[in-house]
Amino acid sequence: MKTIHRIRVVFAGLFVFIGMMAGIDLISDKKPAWSWVIFVVIYNPLLIAAAYVLFNQGVPKPWSPTPEDVAHKLDEQGLLTKETLHATRALQLADYDDEGPSYLLELTDDGVLFLSGYYLYRIAAHRKDTGTFPCTEFTLQRDKQNGQVVNIVCAGTPLSPVIMPLAVSDINFTPAPEDGQIIRNRSYDELQAIVMRAKET
C-alpha cells in the first residue's frame, strides 16, 4: 500500500466516522424510531458511497471501460495504432505514490522501450487470455491522437524482469524518458547501469 493510498484510506475513514457521528447526533435526541431506519438503510450507504467517490478521484472505477473496450472504440474510429515489438530483457522499477510501475525493455532491434504509469496496473488487472506482461512478444495499442498506450496484447513467452526497489523519480536518466518512448540513443545496458548507480547511492 503506497503513501497516497494510505492517505485516501485514512481520510475516507475519518469522513465516514465524522458523518456517522453527526448523523447519530441529529437523530439521538428523542427522534422517532423511523429516523433510525432512515439512518441505517439510506444515510449510511450514501455516506460510504460519497466517501468512495470523493477519495478515489483519478482511480479507475470498477464500471470504467476496460483497456480492451478503449482500444476497440478507438479502432472503430480509426484512431488506434498497433505496433508489435519483441523483447529480450526487462527491468522493472517500483511504484511511487500510486504513479504506477515502470519498465525498461530491451528490444530485438536494439531499441529500449520505456513504459510507466498507473494504467499498467489497469491493463494487468483486466488481462484475460492475452498473456503475462512483460513478455517476449507484445503489441502496443496506442491512441493515434496523443500516442498514449491504451492496451498491451501479449503473444510471446513471459519474461522475468529484474526488479529494482527504485522509482523513476529516484533515477537521473537525463533526460527522463517519456511513457511509451522507444529510446534509440542509449542501450539497455547503459540504462541499467544508470539504475544500478542510483541504487548504490
Image (spheres, grey):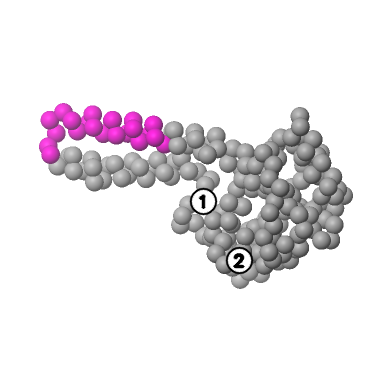
Would residue 68 appear left or right of 7 to someone viewing this image?
right
> Residue 183 placed where, x, y %?
81, 51
Residue 76 placement: quadrant: bottom right
Q: Residues within 10 Å of mark 2 (few under 14, many from 20)?
A: some
> Residue 98 placed where, x, y %?
58, 41
Q: SS for tag 1?
A: loop
Magenta stretch holds residue 131:
no
- State whether residue 74 is above or below residue 148: below
> Residue 104 placed where, x, y %?
74, 50
- State whether residue 2 is above or below residue 90: above
Which residue is labeled 1 in the image? 60
In the rendered structure, which amino acid carries the disc numbered 2? Thr
Frontmost residue, 47 versus 146: 47
| Count of picture labels | 2
In the rendered structure, which amino acid carries the disc numbered 1? Pro
Name the front one of labels 2 and 1: 2
> Residue 55 placed where, x, y %?
46, 40
Q: Residues within 10 Å of mark 1 (few under 14, many from 20)?
A: few
Point 18% across, 39% down: residue: 36
Q: Which residues are magenta?
A: 12-33
- C-alpha distance separating marks 2 and 1: 21 Å
Q: Can residue 23 be seen?
A: yes
Would residue 135 appear left or right of 88 to someone viewing this image?
left
Q: SS for tag 2?
A: loop
Point 56% across, 54% down: residue: 122
Which residue is labeled 2 in the image? 130
Q: Can residue 144 be seen?
A: no
Q: Give the main secondary structure, helix, strand or loop, of the magenta stretch.
A: helix
